[in-house]
Image (cartoon, helix red, strand yellow):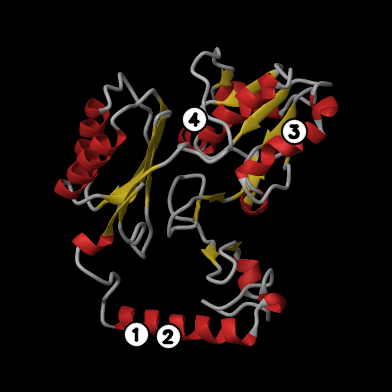
């Protein structure tokens, strides 16, 4: 299974018509995934059995939106082959939930390619800030980087407000998975007068493309699909996801007595009620039965397409 993700901040109108055409295009090419469209642009993660199908689908979407160019991050799934259960195309206020729309009038922040980013990681003068969530940071991160310990990207602005003085003391390098959160984070930091900011261009995934063996990355990179994580060679990682709390679970955590596959992990084991635990066990049983019959999806193709406002 081939997976592609991309985003673009671009002014869009007639969102319902765009959404409907995107749905039709994806169905024609047998592409699943999650695609968000808003007046500020598009954010897409898509998968297909063949790379050519996926490439043609992305090219048609690019032409539909009149995008001159778009950088696509490519990766592969592992033995499960399941990345997205369905196609979801949604109209949203933002293509990444932050609480503030993208400002097209602002100049772009400085961007670092992989070589420049490597030098920044090795330079103690730079504060390296991960703008992802704490559970993503815990699964893997760049050396010397720090986490704002947020549970959602919407909390990042409050963290900045509490730490403005420290952020002004030295140059700051920010990074995220594919670059989209850095775009909004950089604008917010600039609004607060913190303009000594450089963002990793294309995020972690583009860095992996050029430096898969870099010793400056530790662990795996969390992704928002059924693979859960990626290794530095952009193949499926070893992490799984807890069905109860939705956090990634490492191999070490799976060896814990508090881990029960499909039920709980060390993070949430003590918080589950017996009713919730019983429901999760029944869900796990049904999934196991379906897999035994080679039934990975429930419903027809039409039922697996979600079109939402």
Compare marks 1 and 4 and give the one earlier in the sequence: 4
Query: Could you tell me how far apart the alpha carbons at marks 1 and 4 are, in whole angstroms?
Result: 40 Å
The residue lying toward the viewer, choosing from 98 and 150, is 98
Q: Tell me whether circle 1 and circle 4 mark residues in contact (CB < 8 Å).
A: no
Q: Tell me whether circle 3 and circle 2 mark residues in contact (CB < 8 Å).
A: no
As drawn, the label of residue 160 is: 3
Q: Tell me whether circle 2 and circle 1 mark residues in contact (CB < 8 Å).
A: yes
Residue under pointer 2: 285
Q: Which quarter of the figure has residue 160?
A: top right
> x%, y% of residue 278?
54, 87
Q: Which quarter of the figure has residue 83?
A: bottom left
Query: Could you tell me how far apart the alpha carbons at marks 2 and 1 are, in whole angstroms?
Result: 6 Å
Residue under pointer 1: 289
Image position of 259 with respect to 105: above or below: below
Q: Residues within 10 Å of mark 1 (few under 14, many from 20)?
A: few
Specify whether residue 213 is in view. Answer: no
On the picture, is 88 further left or further right than 203?
left
> x%, y% of residue 203?
53, 33
Query: Could you tell me how far apart the alpha carbons at marks 3 and 1 are, in whole angstroms?
Result: 48 Å
As drawn, the label of residue 202 is: 4
């Amino acid at each position: 299974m081939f997976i592609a993700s991309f985003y673009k901040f671009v002014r869009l109108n007639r969102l319902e018509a765009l959404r409907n055409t995107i749905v039709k295009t994806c169905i024609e090419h047998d592409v699943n995934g999650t695609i968000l469209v808003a007046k500020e642009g598009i954010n897409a993660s898509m998968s297909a059995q063949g790379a050519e199908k996926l490439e043609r689908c992305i090219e048609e979407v690019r032409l539909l939106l009149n995008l001159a160019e778009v950088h696509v991050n490519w990766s592969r799934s592992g033995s499960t082959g399941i990345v997205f259960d369905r196609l979801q195309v949604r109209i949203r206020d933002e293509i990444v939930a932050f609480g503030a729309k993208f400002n097209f009038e602002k100049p772009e922040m400085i961007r670092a390619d992989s070589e420049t980013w490597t030098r920044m990681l090795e330079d103690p003068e730079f504060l390296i800030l991960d703008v992802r969530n704490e559970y993503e940071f815990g699964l893997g991160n760049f050396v010397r980087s720090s986490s704002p310990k947020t549970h959602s990207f919407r909390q990042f602005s409050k963290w900045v407000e509490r730490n403005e003085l420290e952020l002004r003391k030295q140059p700051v390098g920010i990074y995220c998975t594919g670059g989209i959160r850095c775009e909004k984070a950089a604008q917010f930091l600039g609004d607060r007068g913190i303009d000594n900011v450089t963002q990793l261009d294309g995020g972690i995934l583009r860095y992996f493309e050029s430096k898969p063996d870099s010793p400056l990355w530790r662990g795996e990179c969390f992704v928002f699909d059924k693979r859960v994580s990626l290794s530095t060679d952009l193949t499926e990682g070893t992490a799984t996801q807890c069905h109860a709390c939705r956090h990634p679970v490492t191999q070490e955590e799976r060896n814990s007595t508090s881990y029960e596959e499909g039920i709980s992990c060390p993070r949430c084991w003590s918080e589950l009620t017996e009713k919730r635990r019983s429901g999760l066990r029944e869900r796990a049983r049904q999934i196991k039965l379906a897999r035994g019959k080679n039934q990975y999806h429930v419903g027809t193709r039409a039922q697996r397409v979600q079109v939402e406002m």
